Image (cartoon, rainbow, N blue to C red):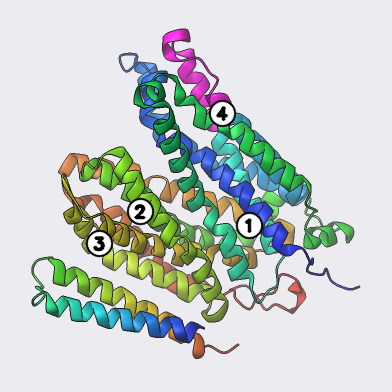
Amino acid sequence: MSRVYALILAVAGGLFVYLAYANGMPSFTQLDWPAYYLVVAFIAFVNAILFAAADFVEE
Amino acid sequence: MAGPAIPKDFRRVIVAASVGNVIEWYDFYIFGSLATILAVKFFEKSHPVAALLSTVALFTAGFLIRPLGAFLFGWMGDRVGRKYTFLITLTGMGLGTGCIGLIPTFEQIGVAAAFILFGLRMVQGLCLGGEYGGAITYVAEHVSDRRRGYYTGWLQTSPTLGIVVSLAVIIATRQFFGNAEFDAWAWRVPFLVSFLLVAIAIYIRLQLQETPIFEQIKAQGQTTRNPWKEAFVSSNIKYVLIACIVLIGQGVVWYSGQFWALFFLQQVSKVDTLTSSYIVGTALLIATPTLILYGWLSDLVGRKAVILTGFFLAAVTYYPLYRWLGEVTQPGNINFWVAVGIIAILVSYVGMVYGPVGAFLAEFFPGRIRYTSVSVPYHIGNGWGGGLVPFITTAAFQSTGSIGYALIYPIVVPAIALILSLFLMPETRRISIWEPEKNAVRA
């Protein structure tokens, strides 16, 4: 089950990366919508790694 | 001699403990949610003593007194038993809250009204200090070692649901009676509702038995003679201090993600009370299951990995998320669902740090002194560290007008907790509380 959640989160992260670039290049000097989308993508990817880690932790 | 066995009705135990806990938190937060009305009804700002009391009572006293309640009721819980102790705290909380709905106002009896309110708030804080440690110990001592994170995760939803219930009761009462009636007298109704809710919770909890683990400790004559000495004047103090570090980080994330989000909408973005309550209430309902989800995940990857990831994400992303929240909640131009989504993310951080922490605490301390050892760090961390978030962040924002300065405390504290916990916090997932003799050392 954790693998399914990891996959969903990774896809959601990818979607937000796409949204960020579809709304213009994110700026590193000021916060705007593309940057916010990248923040959400980052959160989703970190969570995806956490859920995926369940497969690698010994019982 | 055979060890204690997991009771078949443990799910009923979880529900009963959680219902009582939701009501307990409802009682605590209804006071905060109606703080502005209480200030008008019970304090005369031109009276210096009353003004001082209003500041202390409304913002800090209820939080600061909680560790004292943890000391007092923790002692009782480890000496007398978990069940009876958290029945007392529940009753005290209900009476303390309900009576606020009955006391005369400043106009009727003068400054005595402020003193009575202050006293009742202290009763609330004391009883809450004894409640959580009892509930988490009670649930943890009824479920299997392998799924403790998942089952205690259900109990961990109760403070969040307590806020939701308090917001819902206030909205319903305000809409039913109208604003004028509510401000005149109907603000008492949410407090009086507590009498009914607590009576139901007491009835449910009376059906429960003592935990099998405490029964065994008692039967073997291993009950501690002095929980305070054993918990705080022994090598156990090291573990209490480590737990305090983790809990302070957790408490700050908890209050920054839920309470300050509400304060932010009302004080920074100037969103009206009803709309801000709807936004936060909806986000809380959407994201509350993450407490169970991350509790479950902690059974698989460990408590430490999940909690520390929550600290990391909070420290790294609070600033952009709150900036974004400010942009989508401009006066007259509120993007409701994006605001809900942002706050849901903030609440999911609460799920990461708070979902597994009950299991961590229960596994971290031995059964003889579990009630005391769980309660005190929790209320120091959550009550002091977390309870000061609305006060510090609001004061920082009022004095500087900058979201960046306001977020220093919510960002720096989880960052420090992350670094310290990385080195000090042990992984407790494999610690058995049913067969403690099989455990290695705690850290």
In 3D space, how far apart are the residues under numbered discs 3 and 1 (Cα atoms)?
31 Å
Marks 3/1 same chain: yes
Secondary element at image label 1 = helix
The residue tagged 3 is B321
Residues marked 2 and 4 touching at CB (< 8 Å): no
Say whether residue B258 is visible. no
Secondary element at image label 4 = helix
Q: State which mark lies toward you, 2 or 4.
A: 4
Three-letter code for the amino acid on which mark 2 is drawn: Ser
Horizontal and vertical percent position of residue B254: 42, 55
The residue tagged 2 is B256
Q: Residue at x 78, y 54 (%)?
A: B224
Q: Quadrant of the N terminus of chain B?
A: bottom right
Marks 3/2 same chain: yes
Marks 4/3 same chain: yes
Mark sitting earlier along the chain (2/1): 1
Mark sitting earlier along the chain (4/3): 4
Residue B398 shows which numbered tag? none
Q: Residues within 10 Å of mark 4 (few under 14, many from 20)?
A: some
What chain is tagged by disc 3?
B
